[in-house]
Image (tube, rainbow, N blue to C red):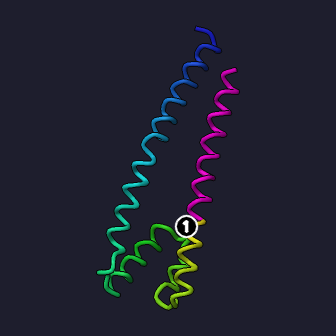
């Protein structure tokens, strides 16, 4: 087997793994949304909110500054944060898609 054939096989395996990841990612994303939405209903107490904030700070340190202000936000600030986070979610989704598209394009270019 020559190098070009070997590279072709490696590329096919990589693309198959990438496609499998892309195919299951929406399922994991939906499950994560369902998990968080069930925890953010009207029945959350102040202590439950504090506990959830502590968990999120540990899991996602980049959100710490927002999480530090949650319990002191008024209605307008809360709504603004919700709208901003939905916008951020769309940006991150688009960024993730661009990363995947660039990897697939690079693999196509590498296999010639």
| Residue found at the very far top of the displayed protein | 1
For residue 107: magenta? yes
Residue 76 is situated, as x and y percent measured from the top left of the image, at: 56, 87
| Residue found at the very far left of the displayed protein | 43
9 horizontally vs 106: left or right: left
Residue 60 is situated, as x and y percent measured from the top left of the image, at: 50, 68
Total labels drawn? 1
Residue 72 is situated, as x and y percent measured from the top left of the image, at: 50, 91
Residue 51 is situated, as x and y percent measured from the top left of the image, at: 36, 79
Magenta stretch?
A: 88-112
Which residue: 59% across, 47% down?
A: 97
Which residue: 36% across, 55% down?
A: 31
The residue that label 1 is drawn on is: 86
Which residue: 46% across, 88% down?
A: 71
Which residue: 63% across, 45% down?
A: 99
Q: Name the magenta segment's main secondary structure.
A: helix
Q: Quadrant of the N terminus?
A: top right
For residue 23, above or below residue 9: below
Q: Secondary structure at mark 1?
A: helix
92 and 106: which one is in front?
92
Picture quadrant of residue 56: bottom left
Q: Quadrant of the C terminus?
A: top right
Crowd class of label 1 (few under 14; some 14 to 19; many from 20; radius 10 Å): few
For residue 17: magenta? no
100 and 10: which one is in front?
100
76 horizontally vs 42: left or right: right
For residue 45, above or below residue 108: below
């Amino acid at each position: 087997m020559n190098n070009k054939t070997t590279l072709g096989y490696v590329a096919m395996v990589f693309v198959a793994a990438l496609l499998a990841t892309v195919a299951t990612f929406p399922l994991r994303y939906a499950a994560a949304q369902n998990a968080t939405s069930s925890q953010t209903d009207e029945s959350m107490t102040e202590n439950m909110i504090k506990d959830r904030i502590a968990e999120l700070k540990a899991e996602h340190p980049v959100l710490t500054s927002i999480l530090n202000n949650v319990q002191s936000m008024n209605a307008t600030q809360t709504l603004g944060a919700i709208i901003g986070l939905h916008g951020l979610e769309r940006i991150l989704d688009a960024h993730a898609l661009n990363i995947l598209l660039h990897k697939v394009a690079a693999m196509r270019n590498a296999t010639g």
